[in-house]
Image (cartoon, rainbow, N blue to C red):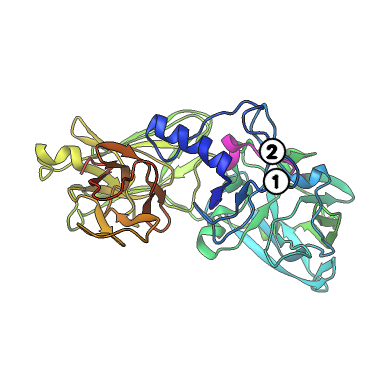
């Protein structure tokens, strides 16, 4: 993945399939005998295509039955690592029987120490006044790079009894959005801090948890001061420990801010209809029950509906939900096929017009309204113009972009035959490497780019 190009033998197999289906991005299975490789053979050049910051080797080991990626260091592939994880903070979440949310009262406790041995300031005790959960802010590095990584495992012990542990051995793509429930997502969105919660929301089905008692929740009622500790490890076996004390204190109960909303259950289908907005939240799309808050603002400039506040971005979703927004009278019949939903960042969510509403599948709570896309994509030739000599060039290069809905398709015809265009959406670069369809002398070339609203 992210490769710049393959060797000639693999490139030929890939290009043959691309021409057969007349598509650049392809995914096709191979028999084990089709492209054999051997140790020492050059198979590809590292690149930075797709979502990456620079040329690198992307290497995975997957379960062949489930396609789950498995930590490759479990197979003896070791990266030099003498660096112990770093612990930077502890957190107490005062839940008091309420679902975790962006309004859950919490306290942060700074830690001191280093080289694997951490503690709180002298005399500091974590006080809880009812049902509570803990969290830890930590990170890890290895000896081979400056990249900051997450830990391999986190374990929480109360009086030497393990009540929670998470181990990152493998991950299901289908359940990967559960990572947003594993961490304190509101804190990530508000401050960028990545805090590992040590208690589970009921809708989180990540398979990383072991030995979790009472979903990791604490609920003491006596006055005993208990010894507690976190053990954080990397896969090389380096570990860091933070020791602390915790006790029940009725006066430490934190009141949850009262906000009037509608109670939505995580384990049932939820539907909301305000007349101007319809929302359908499938079963288990919420990680916890939610006090859902909705409001409406005036129509923005250029919009075709009011702005609908669908809760807020602080609460993650475990999958797509259906949002339909009623169009106002300015959305004339000739514009209806061009209508789509956009969020607070004016990012298109696609969408189609149905019975007076524009409907789309969305992955985040946010503010949404209707816009239309009537503007065709832009094509900018970089190294070619009509009648240009390409004698000393190996390819034709363009930049393509779209103002709103995004690029749907691109097709090129060379001398009345389809030719392959390669695309890097990150830079908007689109190019054709000259091949057997390019003849000496004059060549007739046509490039057509279509956006997701068929402009």
Give the image location of residue 261, x and y in percent.
41, 45
Q: Residue furthest right?
A: 160
How would you rate the neighbour count of disc 1 (Cα within 10 Å): few for under 14, some for 14-19, many for 20 or more?
A: few
Numbered label attached to residue 37: 2
Is 34 displayed left or right of 303 in the figure? right
Q: Is residue 250 magenta?
A: no
Q: Nearer the viewer, residue 398 or 279?
A: 398
Is 117 displayed left or right of 381 in the figure? right
Is 4 displayed left or right of 85 in the figure? left
Q: Do the CB atoms of the residues marked 1 and 2 lie less than 8 Å apart? A: yes
How would you rate the neighbour count of disc 2 (Cα within 10 Å): few for under 14, some for 14-19, many for 20 or more?
A: few
Q: Is residue 175 magenta?
A: yes
Give the image location of residue 39, x and y in percent.
76, 43
Measure how far apart labels 1 and 2 are at the Cα level.
Answer: 7 Å
Q: Quadrant of the C terminus?
A: top left
Give the image location of residue 203, x and y in percent.
59, 36
Work out whether 344 lies above or below 284.
below
Q: Nearer the viewer, residue 260 or 78?
A: 78
SS class, disc 2: loop
Q: Residue at x 28, y 52 (%)?
A: 404
The residue beneath circle 1 is: 41
Q: From this viewpoint, is residue 272 visible?
A: yes
Q: Residue at x 77, y 51 (%)?
A: 154
Which residues are drawn in magenta? Answer: 165-176
Toward which corner of the image does residue 23 lie, by quadrant?
top left
Numbered label attached to residue 140: none
């Amino acid at each position: 993945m992210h490769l710049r190009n393959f060797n000639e033998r693999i490139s030929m197999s890939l290009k043959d399939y691309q021409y057969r289906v007349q598509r650049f991005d392809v995914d096709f299975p191979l028999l084990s005998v089709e492209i054999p490789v051997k140790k020492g053979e050059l198979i590809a050049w590292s690149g930075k295509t797709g979502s990456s910051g620079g040329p690198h080797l992307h290497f995975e080991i997957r379960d062949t039955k489930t396609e789950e990626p498995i930590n490759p260091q479990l197979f003896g592939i070791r990266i030099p690592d003498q660096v112990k994880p770093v612990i930077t903070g502890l957190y107490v979440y005062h839940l008091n029987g309420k679902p975790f949310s962006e309004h859950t009262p919490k306290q942060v406790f700074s830690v001191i120490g280093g080289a694997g041995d951490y503690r709180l300031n002298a005399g500091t005790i974590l006080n809880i006044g009812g049902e509570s959960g803990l969290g830890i802010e930590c990170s890890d590095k290895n000896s081979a790079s400056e990249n900051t990584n997450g830990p391999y495992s986190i374990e929480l012990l109360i009086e030497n009894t393990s009540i929670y542990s998470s181990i990152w051995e493998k991950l299901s793509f289908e359940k990967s959005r559960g990572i947003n429930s594993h961490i304190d997502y509101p804190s990530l969105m508000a401050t960028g801090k990545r805090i590992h919660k040590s208690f589970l929301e009921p809708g989180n089905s990540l398979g990383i948890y072991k030995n979790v008692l009472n979903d990791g929740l604490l609920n003491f009622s006596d006055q005993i001061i208990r010894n507690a500790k976190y053990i954080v490890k990397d896969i090389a076996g380096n570990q860091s420990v933070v020791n602390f004390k915790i006790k029940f204190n009725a006066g430490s109960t934190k009141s949850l801010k009262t906000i009037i909303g509608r109670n939505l259950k995580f384990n049932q289908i939820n539907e909301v209809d305000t007349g101007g907005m319809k929302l359908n939240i499938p079963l288990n799309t919420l990680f916890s029950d939610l006090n859902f808050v909705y409001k409406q603002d005036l129509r923005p400039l250029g919009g075709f509906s009011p702005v609908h506040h669908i809760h807020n971005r602080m609460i993650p979703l475990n999958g797509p939900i259906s949002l339909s927004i009623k169009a106002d009278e300015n959305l004339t019949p000739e514009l209806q096929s061009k209508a789509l939903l956009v969020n607070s960042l004016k990012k298109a969510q696609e969408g189609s017009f149905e019975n007076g509403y524009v409907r789309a599948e969305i992955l985040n709570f946010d503010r949404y309204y209707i816009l239309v896309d009537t503007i065709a994509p832009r094509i900018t030739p970089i190294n070619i113009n009509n009648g240009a000599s390409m004698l000393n060039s190996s390819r034709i290069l363009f930049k393509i972009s779209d103002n709103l809905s995004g690029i749907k398709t691109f097709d090129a015809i060379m001398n009345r035959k389809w030719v392959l265009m390669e695309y890097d959406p990150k830079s908007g670069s689109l190019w054709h490497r000259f091949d057997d369809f390019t003849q000496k002398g004059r060549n007739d070339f046509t490039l057509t780019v279509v956006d997701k609203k068929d402009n």
